[in-house]
Image (tube, rainbow, N blue to C red):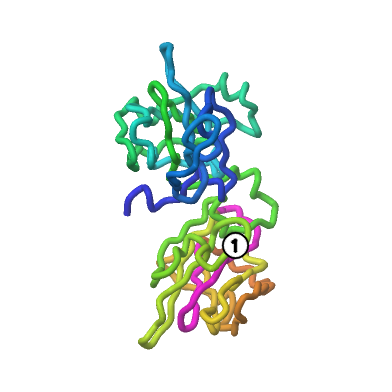
Amino acid sequence: MTFTDLTDLASRRLGGGVVAANDEFFAAMDNLVNPEPSEFETWTYGPKGKVYDGWETRRRREPGHDWAIVRLGAPGQIHGVVVDTAHFTGNFPPFASVDAAELPGHPSPSDLAAANWTEIVAKSPLKGDNRNHFPIAPGPRHTHVRLNIHPDGGVARLRVHGVAVPDPALLHGLTVNLAAMELGAVVAGCSDMFYGSPGNLLLPDRARQMSEGWETARRREPGNEWVLVRLAAEGRVRLVELDTTHFKGNAPGAAALRATADPSSSWSDLLPRTPLQPDTRHYFRLDSGVAASHVRLDIYPDGGMARLRIWGETTATG
């Protein structure tokens, strides 16, 4: 497992955004956090020249460097950064560096300009048309990063991989989706992910198509497929949503849920094996009172699901 297997905390899917940049003359800063890979079409030209699916600044004629500030959609502990210069060949920055900061609330660009920034990636050389990987020793929680390009040029995407760390004040005393990726829930194990990543189950919003869910290969031997989720915090589960939206001829025939506060110990049934319908959002109210830090979703025998929601309130331990 590498740092790129962790959540992209800056992704637009989690609410990430580029809140400020000193220049975006050729291509918009907002493209940096788009979840889809950058695309390139030879015929797309506009009044300012070639239209790039990324962020591109004008040619710098004075000393200094260009920068863009990204609000993480899910604040957390950063384990690595990818500076993707896809399709930028004669116009990529030769060097980049990255700073990080933690600010409470909803800071404005002027608040961010006055913030105390910590360098997490020193000025380093970049390759054009390449995913440039920079592992980072995990440190404290951060809410924003600043990408510095030296001196100018274009970057297609910025990925900030790590572990989401929610503000406990936003969870305590409330019923929340404990399986939300943006709050820190992660997939801890999976039997099969041939067609789609199990991490998709934990994304916010609704899946727009089948590819945005988790889908296994067709199972040809006895048994069933499963996924293990470490919740954002230990909590008592009150409501479960099993969403098979877009999965019609390939939805699981049934599903079951188990939970534990200690994966090395015993497990409790949250939802017994229950039939599922294709292309349907299923809701099950649970009042078991079981404290859970992990849940295991079993699907029978295989198939695909769009989303998994585990609603509950945190325990004192959580």
- Please give the range of residues in magenta: 294-318
Could you tell me residue 196's position as x and y percent?
45, 66
At x 41% / y 81%, what residue is drawn? 218
Q: Please indicate whether residue 223 sits to the left or right of residue 269 in the image.
A: left
Instruction: List the residue tagged with mark 1.
Output: 208
At x 43% / y 81%, what residue is drawn? 224
Residue 289 versus residue 71: which sits nearer the camera? Answer: 71
Question: Is 296 included in the stretch rendered in magenta?
Answer: yes
For disc 1, the neighbor class at 10 Å (few under 14, some 14 to 19, many from 20) is few
Could you tell me residue 285's position as x and y percent?
69, 72
At x 52% / y 45%, what residue is drawn? 34
Number of marks in the rendered image: 1
User: In the image, what residue type sits under mark 1?
Assistant: Arg
Would residue 164 be seen by someone viewing this image from the given angle? yes
The image quadrant that residue 203 belongs to is bottom right
Q: Residue furthest top?
A: 62
The image quadrant that residue 219 belongs to is bottom left
The image quadrant that residue 115 belongs to is top right
Question: Is 109 included in the stretch rendered in magenta?
Answer: no
At x 54% / y 60%, what residue is drawn? 202
Question: Looking at the figure, which quarter contains the N terminus?
Answer: bottom left
Would residue 141 be seen by someone viewing this image from the given angle? no
Could you tell me residue 243's position as x and y percent?
61, 70
Q: Main secondary structure of the magenta part?
A: strand
Residue 80 versus residue 152: which sits nearer the camera? Answer: 152
Q: Please indicate whether residue 64 sits to the left or right of residue 185 in the image.
A: left
Could you tell me residue 109's position as x and y percent?
61, 25
Residue 123 versus residue 154: which sits nearer the camera? Answer: 154
Residue 168, compared with residue 270, is above or below; it is above
